[in-house]
Amino acid sequence: MTFLAPAMLLALTAIAVPVLIHLFSKPRLKRIRWAATRFLLASIEKNKRKLKVEDLLLLILRCLLVILLVLVFARPALLVKASSLLLSGEKTSAVILLDQSMSMGQSDGAKTRFEQAKAAALDILAKLGSGSSCALYLVSDHTRMVVAKPTQDFALLRRVLENAAVSDFGSDLYPGLKDAVDTLKGMGGRKEIFIISDSQAAAWKQLGNIRKLQEEHKDDIHFRYFIMGDHGEDNLAVTSLKTVGSVAAVNQPVRCVIEVANFGKAAVEKVPVKISLDDEAPQDETVIDRIEPGAVRGVSLFVRVRHAGYHAISATIPGDRLPADNQRSTALLVLEQMKALVVDGSVKGNPVDRDGFFLRNALVPVAPGQAAQYYMKALAGKPGDLEGNALKQYDIIFLCNVADLSPLASQNLQQYVTQGGSLVVFPGAATKVAFYNNDKNFSALLPAKLGAMRDAPEPQKFLAWQSKDYAHPVVSLWNDPDSGSLNGVKFFKYYPLTVKSDTMPVVLKYSNNEIAVAEQAAGKGRVFLFGGPATTDWSNFPVNPAFVPLMTRIVAYSTSTQGANLNLSPGQPFSFEVESEYAGKDLAVQRIGRGKRQIVGRVEQGDHSAWLRYSDTELSGAYALYIGDDKMPKVVFAVRADPAESDLHQQPQADVAALVNPPEPGGQQKSAASGESDNRLVPGKELWFYLAIAALLFAVLETIYAHYCSRTK
């Protein structure tokens, strides 16, 4: 047994009070000589011992009453093993925190850790004392209070536990712990928080805050940790899948870069990687020869899409004990064709001499006889074309050596970009710098201001683009030496660019560290600004091997905003705007390759349109949404887990031990290894209630007995 408030034991000195009262309350007798006294002596001597016994018993009763009252306030408690869940029938208010993050899906070959955790939670419910209440939270980097307040309806709790499923959320225990503490703060009696998790390091990322929270409430809330699994499993995961380099168009090869990470302690060899479209058979595959421990290897595979619309691409590796990350998907919009408007600043008789000549050929890099079948249609235009209302038909607009724009053209262009269009600007000799920098509508679109035109410095008389450390996604390809170099691009004249904000993305710099190309998001669209024209008048850029791939990548990157909301994190709700005619129709969903089509609601009516909304996105993978009886999905989106959740490495045991097994007197601390029985003796059931009842009974007994002792003798 131990005492939770041992300082109160000092009050035991109050036992002296009834003793002193007893000693000083003896009656003082006055001697009177009386002849008949001798006849009473025999009777007095006979009762003397009886009176002393009565007085002693009364003193003992009063001392015991004081002792019981002191013990009540000292809060005695039985000592039990720390690993014991049995609360000896004591009424408890509890919260069970059940980790449902993706790492809990790892298996030991028989059961997943989440299944083991559910069994532990059911065991806790079975062992809570009569009259206890309990809440249930599913925790990860999201906290789901499935039973928000402690309830005595354990049948409900068991049903919820049986239906609970592991998710692909990330890990973070602290928010759920904080919510549980807030729930129990206003409750009386014994309070318990049961945390059932694995020892994955990601779950303990806020270890400092967890320690602080537990220390602040150590006197009124008991924290009990149950760690599932003996160690972190080795794990191989697909951590990234991206489409790069070109626009996703019908019958055009789409290059996909897949990254596979080895989170194990040993190298892995001969890892097959496959890529597929929607739920079709794999279109391409390769084998990674070797992945070292802790390393990431990337490979490129290709798919070809036969139909325009929304599609999902999935990369797959062989299964292991954590199946959730053996496949990764990405959703994209595949276009039938794209239209680009190339606006020439000066319209010359010979097309070869026009400002957009090289650019139009770079956008359609095929033989003239194949141009009709190519997805990109590059149309020549003039500044006046921007004054019309037909800009929405173009996916991207290029301005080549345009001097200035009329107010209407400037306004139309600003509206076009903010509503999702893409714009690429190549200033040239005809450019009016004052207009570019000061026009209310046009200058707001540009990521940088233009300085006065300069000649390249002596002695080279040219400025080359940077040769390494390409940070922007458009040019990151050239970080690989096998892809060539951008350093071969040389400008003899240029406009120095000054970005409007330090946070503005810089695409490229010159070798002297001046900015060559800048980019910014404007509304729903994107704008790229170069420091010179797309002609050979000022540079060799149009005839450099990098010209065509760079233009292709800019088109792909800037127009990718059309599908920017197609790839979500687990738990993020999906919304998609459709025509108002669909409002009220059935909405069905199918997890591509993993389930059947099911009706989940109806298309919602909006102000001037309708909306497809779906929020059950806890599991990663590709989802197809259908309207009514349509055979083709209206839209496809993908849910992608945080790659960090695939790292199953453990938090150091010493860190977890400080919470699971606080230091004993003398500084000794047990290991927190999972599966090890904790035989430490810790405070268990409190006894103050029973002692208070005993004190009440003793008080009643003392009163009755004191009355008896005060009778006439």
Image (cartoon, rainbow, N blue to C red):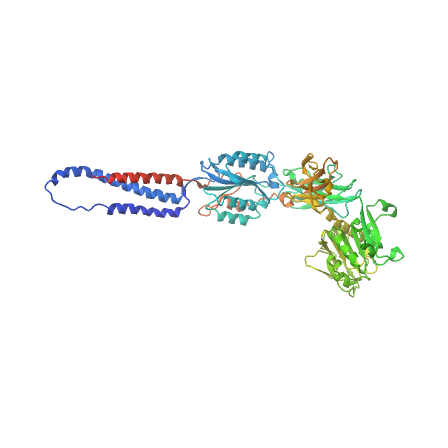
- The answer to whether any part of residue 488 appears in the image is no
**Quarter holding residue 286:** top right
Q: How many marks?
A: 0
Could you say which is closer to the camera, residue 702 or residue 90? Answer: 702
Could you say which is closer to the camera, residue 268 or residue 356? Answer: 356
The extreme bottom residue here reads 458
Q: Give the image location of residue 518, x and y in percent.
A: 73, 57
- The answer to whether any part of residue 26 appears in the image is yes
Q: Residue at x 34, y 46 (%)?
A: 12
Q: Give the image location of residue 351, x and y in percent.
A: 88, 55
- Give the side of residue 656 with respect to residue 641, left or right: left
- Give the side of residue 322 with respect to residue 547, left or right: left
The extreme right residue here reads 349
Could you say which is closer to the camera, residue 596 or residue 198? Answer: 596
Q: Quadrant of the N terminus?
A: top left
**Quarter holding residue 57:** top left
The extreme left residue here reads 35
Q: Give the image location of residue 353, x and y in percent.
A: 87, 57
The extreme front residue here reads 607
Q: Residue at x 87, y 48 (%)?
A: 368
Could you say which is closer to the camera, residue 306 or residue 402? Answer: 402
Q: Quadrant of the C terminus?
A: top left
Q: Give the image location of residue 692, x and y in percent.
A: 37, 40
